[in-house]
Each structure stands twice: as C-alpha cells, then as structure tokens.
Image (cartoon, rainbow, N blue to C red):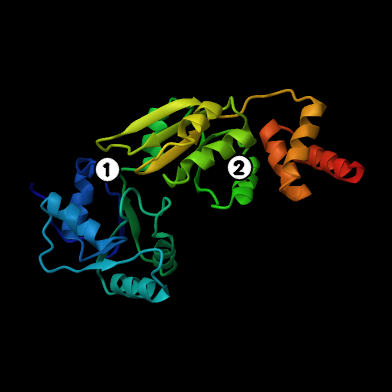
Amino acid sequence: MNFQIKPLSAGLYFVATPIGSARDMTLRGLDILASADLIAAEDTRTARKLMEIHGVPLNGRKVVAFHDHSGEGAVARLVEDIKGGKSVAYVSEAGTPLVADPGYELGRAVIAHGLAVTTAPGASAVLAALTVSGLATDRFAFVGFLPAAKTQRETEIAALRDVPFTLVFYESPKRVGEMLANLRDVLGAEREGVVCRELTKKFEETVRGPLGELAEAFADRQVKGEVVVLVGRAGATEVAEVDVTAALREAMQTMRVKDAATVVAGALGLPRKQVYQAALTLKDTD
C-alpha cells in the first residue's frame, strides 16, 4: 500500500484504531502513522502489530507507551517533543482515544501550551453499537463503565432514569449479567435494551429485547469479548402507592434510606423527593 508520507506540522494527532477488524483503519490514520515523528500508544505491542498488518514502516521511529498509569512526567515529555517541533500520533489500544480510553490529560496539556491538537476519526464502539441497536440515535448519552459495587451502580443507574436519551454503557463480560439485572431492577423489566458483543469481529452478536428478558438470558451465561449495553428511553408509567411501599421496604433491608429512595424512584419512574418522603415516613412507622 502506498502512503502519503510527508512531513506533518508539529502537534498532537489523535488517531482512531479498529475495534476489531483491522480493515476498519482509515487511510488518513495510516498516513499519519506513516508520517509522525513519534508514535505514542496505550499498548505498544498492539500499535506495532497494527502498523505491521498495514505495512506502515517505522524506519527507526520510536513507539512509546502512554496509558492510564502514565504520570505527569510522561505528559511533560510528549509536550516538550511537540514544543520542539515534532508531530506526535497517539493511538489507544482500540477505538477512539479519550472515549473510555487514555488521552484526556495529554490533550489538555498540549492545548494549555497553545499547541495544535487534531484528530483522525474512525472506529468507535459507541457509534458502532448505536448503529446496529435499533434504538433512537438522535440523542444519546455515553455513560461508560458503571461502578463495580452493586449499591453504587444502582444509585448511578437511578440518577440516569429521567435522561431523555438512549443510554450507552461499556461493561466487563464477567459482570454483564449482574449489570443487566441492576438495569432491570432500577429502570423496569419492560424498558428496551440491547447487548452488543465483539462488534466487527468474527463472533459479533447483537441481542435485543426488554431488560427483563436480557437479564434472564445473560444471568448464567459465560460471556467473552468486549461488551456494549444500550438502554432505550423511558416511557411514562402509573404506580400504585402499595407498590412504592413494598419496593421501599425491600430496598431498605439492605440500603440506607437515601439510597433506597434513589433506587426505587428510578425503578418506578417517580420523583425522588416524593419517594424519599415516603421512605422517611415508612422508617418512622415501622
């Protein structure tokens, strides 16, 4: 393959890389990787392999590591390289840098020094999942990974209940069954959901259905690969007072009053203040 190997202006170039199929790499991204003075990568082995697949020669150029555990020193060195006139291409292990991947601190530092930052857009698991989900895409909120602890996870889910957008999450394959159960319990079993697994790869899978069905389907399933979970927008519901009381009693067995009210309000689609007052009354009368 012939690349446009030509000098790049000094600056930071964020380059999106494939999330699965190596052929999803853009031509402009390859040109930048072929031309940059220095390549920084979340995973240097993955970056070298990608360049090897596409026949991009290093010609003695360095590939340096930059990831979540890189400190201020690593940021400062790359900034100094750019200030000295070098072009730096940054790639995360897969997908678009900064989207649940490293690069934010580096970009902020380069901008703070008045240096150029640009991007070569390409593959993104968020957009790929939205494309195949069948859910509304005109407005969406990318949440990323939820907390690992159950109570914190349910509280954060409850806070998202009234967001009038399609919700997009990343999740570990080991925890996706538990996460779907939390989504069902907090947002309701009938709310639409989609699980996308191994997008663009050989064993790509998209499972659509109500959260209740998805939670059941993945409850005991051994899941492998990268997972994106999407949740559709909420609809209006009517809830009986007896259901609120029953839900609060159950939640308050394992949660503080405040957390129980947040979770129940999210699950039943009710104002949190109203449910919190009901929880306080229930606590005083029980």
x, y percentage for residue 140? Answer: 50, 36
Q: Is residue 60 left or right of residue 127?
A: left
The residue type indicated by label 2 comes to Ile
What element does badge 2 sit on? Answer: helix
Q: Do the residues bearing badges 1 and 2 touch, measured as CB atoms within 8 Å?
A: no
Q: Is residue 32 visible?
A: yes
What element does badge 1 sit on? Answer: loop
Q: Which residue is mark 2?
A: 157
Q: Is residue 280 left or right of residue 137?
A: right
Q: CA distance from mark 1 to mark 2?
A: 29 Å
x, y percentage for residue 246? Answer: 77, 33
Depth order, front residue of 144/209: 209
Q: Residue furthest front?
A: 220
**Residue at point 60% right, 42% down?**
157
Asked which quadrant contains residue 276, the reply is top right
Residue 218's label in the rendered image is: none
x, y percentage for residue 104? Answer: 43, 60
**Residue at point 33% right, 48% down?**
95
